[in-house]
Image (cartoon, rainbow, N blue to C red):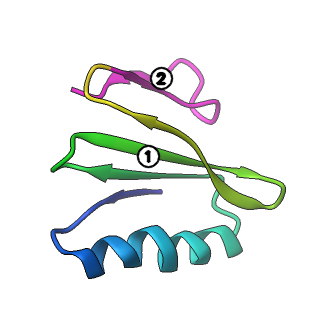
Amino acid sequence: MVEILSPGELNEQQDKEVKLKLYSLHGVQEYWIVNWQLKTLEIYRRTDAQLQLAATLLESDTLTSPLLPGFSTSIA
């Protein structure tokens, strides 16, 4: 699941709390939250039956995922 944050504190709270819990409850294996303003990408992965923050990538980093073997892309 990929979410691109909309401007506003309420939108950010909904994506990082409400949707995170909902996706975790429904078995989503990985949830990426893109913050286009900060140029970051938060990766949440399923651990112990819930989604937990695994990494925060910056513009200079490369995104990979164990769910997508062979896939990689620059955050920039």
Q: Which region of the structure is painted magenta?
A: 61-76
Task: Name the quarter where the C terminus is drawn.
Answer: top left
Label 1 sits on a secondary structure element that is: strand
Q: Is residue 60 above or below residue 18?
A: above
Label 2 sits on a secondary structure element that is: loop
Q: Which of marks 2 and 1 is in front?
A: 1
Q: In this view, does 67 lie above or below 53?
A: above
Q: Would you identify the image quadrant in which residue 49 lies?
A: bottom right
Nearer-the-camera pick, 68 or 25: 25
Task: Give the residue pinned by disc 1.
Answer: 42
Task: Residue at 59% x, 78% y: name it.
Answer: 22
Q: Is residue 65 left or right of residue 41?
A: right
Q: Is residue 73 above or below residue 53?
A: above
- Can residue 45 be found in the magenta stretch? no
Of the residues shown, which amino acid type is indicated by label 2? Phe
Of the residues shown, which amino acid type is indicated by label 1? Glu
Q: Would you identify the image quadrant in which residue 39 lies?
A: top left
Within-10-Å neighbours for mark 2: few <14, some 14–19, many 20+: few
Q: Would you identify the image quadrant in which residue 73 lies?
A: top left
